[in-house]
Amino acid sequence: MPEGHTIHRLAQDHADRFVGQTVQVSSPQGKFSDAAALLTGQELTRTEAHGKHLFLQFGEGFDGAPWVHIHLGLFGKYTLGDTPAPPPTDTVRLRLLTETSFSDLRGPTACALITDAEKDAIHDRLGPDPLRPDADPARAYARISRSRTTIAALLMDQKVIAGVGNVYRAEVLFRHGIDPYTPGKDLTQAQLTAIWDDLKMLMREGVRLNRIDTVRPEHTPEAMNRPPRVDDHGGEVYVYRRAPHPCHLCGTEIRTAELAARNLFWCPACQPDRNRI
């Protein structure tokens, strides 16, 4: 599933290509046809992201339903490009088209026309997003500090922090030497602040580069004279999907286990269980 930086990059790319433009909207697949008929010929006025949710606003609002809400889920994919657009296939749920650009959405979990009130309800159920200027990390700190749930599970809970997925979860815990099975209540305020600040930095870089890179400059392949990572995920990481290879820092075998139906990755030496020390 795409992580939050991908959705913010999609919001940015849609803004660059479509905001202020009159857009032709269609649904070759047919599942969004009624809404597309209402939207086509409208101007795209705003794009917004919160966690893994993308919002596109058309016009000044009409019939109480000014927003398209999109959640890619596990299988959703976007293609954006310059015109001429390729012939649409019957898998395209939503196509946006102008004289210069096109956008094709396939396989989303959600693609719906929603009201302002429905949009507000989505924001209300999500935790603070490190990439949003209105984010209040104190909300996340409060939930984590009261919880006996592992920090690894809490970071993946979109009600706690919105936009963090499996890669950022694994990498930020490694970067701060935190055992993923540590209960949230056992983390210090300094650790929570450091995690949040690091997520802001890493995810902003993710938006800029359109990929996830989490290794510090001194740990890049060039700096360490090691081969670059070869993985369809792309980007340089410390532990994500690196089991059972050795840790870049200490040489210990990276471990993996299932937690809440997702694969967890960590280095047992660099992220020790303090209860066993």
Image (cartoon, rainbow, N blue to C red):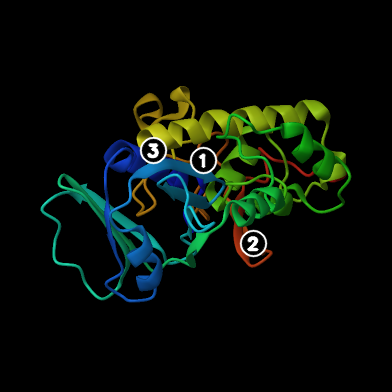
The disc labelled 3 sits on which kind of residue? Gln
Q: Are marks 3 and 2 in contact (CB under 8 Å)?
A: no
* Furthest residue in direction front, as rendered: 63
Q: CA distance from mark 3 to mark 2?
A: 35 Å
Residue holding disc 2: 257
Say whether residue 182 is visible.
yes
Mark sitting earlier along the chain (2/1)? 1
Q: Position of residue 272 (x, y in %)?
A: 74, 41
Secondary structure under badge 3?
helix
Question: Left or right: 61 with respect to 168?
Answer: left
The disc labelled 1 sits on which kind of residue? Tyr
The disc labelled 2 sits on which kind of residue? Ala
Quarter holding the C terminus is top right
Closer to the camera in the image, 248 or 20: 20
Q: Position of residue 203 (x, y in %)?
A: 51, 36
Residue holding disc 3: 12
Vertical placement of 16 versus 28: above or below? above
Q: Position of residue 98 (x, y in %)?
A: 20, 49
Q: Would you call the spot at circle 2 few (<14 residues within 10 Å), some (14-19), or many (20 or more)?
A: few
Mark sitting earlier along the chain (3/2)? 3
Say whether residue 158 is visible.
no
Q: CA distance from mark 2 to mark 1?
A: 16 Å
Question: Left or right: 201 with respect to 173?
Answer: left
Q: Position of residue 73 (x, y in %)?
A: 50, 63
Residue holding disc 1: 238
Mark sitting earlier along the chain (3/1)? 3
* Furthest residue in direction left, as rendered: 84
Marker disc for residue 226: none
Secondary structure under badge 2?
strand
Please report the residue visible at 31 percent of the width from the left and 75 percent of the height from the top: 29
